[in-house]
Amino acid sequence: MLFADSFYKKSQNVFLEPHFKGQRSGWIEVVCGCMFSGKTEELIRRLKRAKIADMKVEVFKPRIDTRYDDVSVVSHDTNTLLAQPVDSAQKILKISDDTTVVGIDEAQFFDDDIVPVCQELAMRGIRVVIAGLDMDYRGEPFGPMPKLLAVAEYVTKVHAICVHCGNLATHSYRLAEGESVVFLGEKGQYEPRCRSCYHHGNILRLK
Ligand code: ZN
């Protein structure tokens, strides 16, 4: 049973993670999805594995994300990894010479400069692992994410579960009032929904 368990986990990881053995140049991986889809957990999982493999990892996030501790990528299950908050994407280029893996969380909050920055890193031979929301609460592509998805070698879309029907959720439905797209929130302000329930809007709140 123990063997079967670990074999299952192993094959799951192979399925999720790009197979890069033997690839010598740098590349870009994007993990995207809606809120509560486990994007950051997947980013942390990949970066921790890189650390186990003795790679020098540096992690960044935009300074705008202040929901939690200022210096860590924090996912909803409190599985954390230290991250450096940066004011602009350009600052990510100032990594130390021995860094071989760069992680970026909440990439949707960077401006379009993040795209050439990631490409520059990949050209330097660095593995770039990016996590971000693919759509905002209006269902529109979020910030630089569509461009990052286009230039990436590997794209993984993770899903949450629709709180209304139990199908795979791809949309972040906003329950709170307000117009700002850059609205940081937690459970109670957003909920994951499938395409169909997302388009039902507030009707579902009346049941
Ligand atoms: Zn649904």
Image: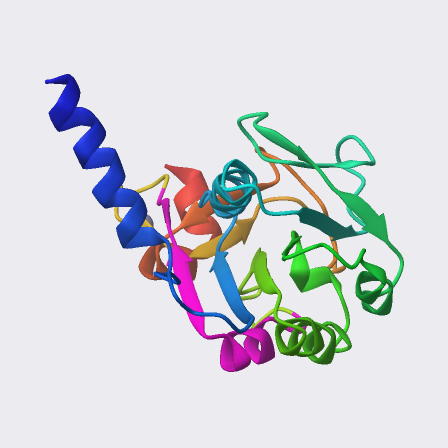
Dividing the image into 4 quarters, which one contains the C terminus?
Answer: top left
Residue for point 57% across, 65% down: 138
Q: Is residue 114 above or below residue 133?
A: below
> In the rendered image, is residue 200 in sight?
no
Determine the residue located farthest toward the top in the rendered image. Answer: 2
47 to the left or right of 201: right
Split into 4 quadrants, where in the image is the N terminus? top left
Front residue of this view, candidates 193 and 17 = 17
Q: Is residue 170 left or right of residue 35?
A: left
Choose between 96 and 114: the one closer to the eye.
96
> Looking at this view, is 128 or 143 the one in front?
128
Q: Which residues are magenta?
A: 143-162
Please say if 108 is above or below 16. below
Q: Nearer the viewer, residue 2 or 199?
A: 2
- Percent of width and height locating residue 30: 51, 63
Q: What residue do we see at 18% from left, 25% from top?
A: 5
Q: Position of residue 26 (x, y in %)?
A: 56, 71
Q: Is residue 31 above or below residue 8?
A: below
Q: Is residue 159 magenta?
A: yes
Q: Is residue 6 left or right of residue 66?
A: left
